């Protein structure tokens, strides 16, 4: 019906890619650690929405713009890199605050809507995700598909559904691990600082990345 091939291999490869560490999982982990499992799950859902944008771009050919235009790729890449560095800097700043905020205080300060919006931006401003869909999905579309765009949408939604489940589970795990260190303020600040450094590192890596 959807004119796809090797669907089992697609699901297996997608799940392996979903558990590969990157900016998305790091953002979910940071929100689960600082604001609790609910915030982590909200972040996971936001990542899923950002992924939906890339799926639509891939299905209707808009990702070709990023693949073929160096200028467009650079603009999106630098915007995404700047945002990751910004998140890293704010995380580092919060890690240096005296005392440790409770999760309720962090949630009150940021809010779930802000967490959700930030997650969308983290994913949507990563041109590598767009290029990934453009390169990955066509391998599983039947060569003579009657409606390739529909096949793209089906595969993209399946990939995103599996990825969102993985991300939600990751939010649960990250929150549970953080609970074990709840009473150790110094460890909590060190973990926050480490997350901040990783965000900045990911931003810098994205900034120097190429289209290939």
Image: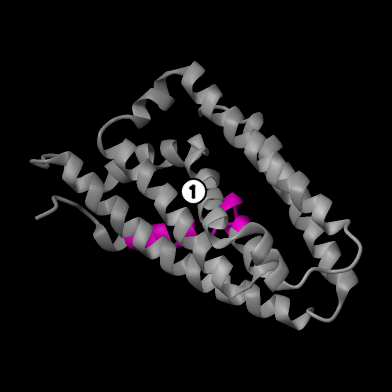
Residue 19 in view, yes or no: no
Give the vertical position of 125 relative to 151 (above or below): above
Circle 1 residues within 10 Å: few <14, some 14–19, many ≥20:
many
Residue 26 lies in magenta, yes or no?
yes
Q: What is the secondary structure assignment of the residue under circle 1?
A: helix
Q: Position of residue 16 (x, y in %)?
A: 47, 61
113 in relation to 71, above or below? below
Which residue occupies the foreground of this view, 194 or 211?
Answer: 194
Q: Residue furthest front?
A: 108
Residue 31 percent location from the top left of the image: 63, 63
Quarter of the figure with the N terminus: bottom left
| Quadrant of res 150 | top left
- Specify whether 34 is left or right of 146: right
Q: Which residue is mark 1?
A: 120
Q: Which residues are magenta?
A: 10-27
Measured as percent of width and height from the top left, residue 80 is found at 58, 36
Residue in the image at 78% along x and 49% along y: 197
| Residue lying at 48% horizontally and 59% vertically, measured from the top left | 18
């Amino acid at each position: 019906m959807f004119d796809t091939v090797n669907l089992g291999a697609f699901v297996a490869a997608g799940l392996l890619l979903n558990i590969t560490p990157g900016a998305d999982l790091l953002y979910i982990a940071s929100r689960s650690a600082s604001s609790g499992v609910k915030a982590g799950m909200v972040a996971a859902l936001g990542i899923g929405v950002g992924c939906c944008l890339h799926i639509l771009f891939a299905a209707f050919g808009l990702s070709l713009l990023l693949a073929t235009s160096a200028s467009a790729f650079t603009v999106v890449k630098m915007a995404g890199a700047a945002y990751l560095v910004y998140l890293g800097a704010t995380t580092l700043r919060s890690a240096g605050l005296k005392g440790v905020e409770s999760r309720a205080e962090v949630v009150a300060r940021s809010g779930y809507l802000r967490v959700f919006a930030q997650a969308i931006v983290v994913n949507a401003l990563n041109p590598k995700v767009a290029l990934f869909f453009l390169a990955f999905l066509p391998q599983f579309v039947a060569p003579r598909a009657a409606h390739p765009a529909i096949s793209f949408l089906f595969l993209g939604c399946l990939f995103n559904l599996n990825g969102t489940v993985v991300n939600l589970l990751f939010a649960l795990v990250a929150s549970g691990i953080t609970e074990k260190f709840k009473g150790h303020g110094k460890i909590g600040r060190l973990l926050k600082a480490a997350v901040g450094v990783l965000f900045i590192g990911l931003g810098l890596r994205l900034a120097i990345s190429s289209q290939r």
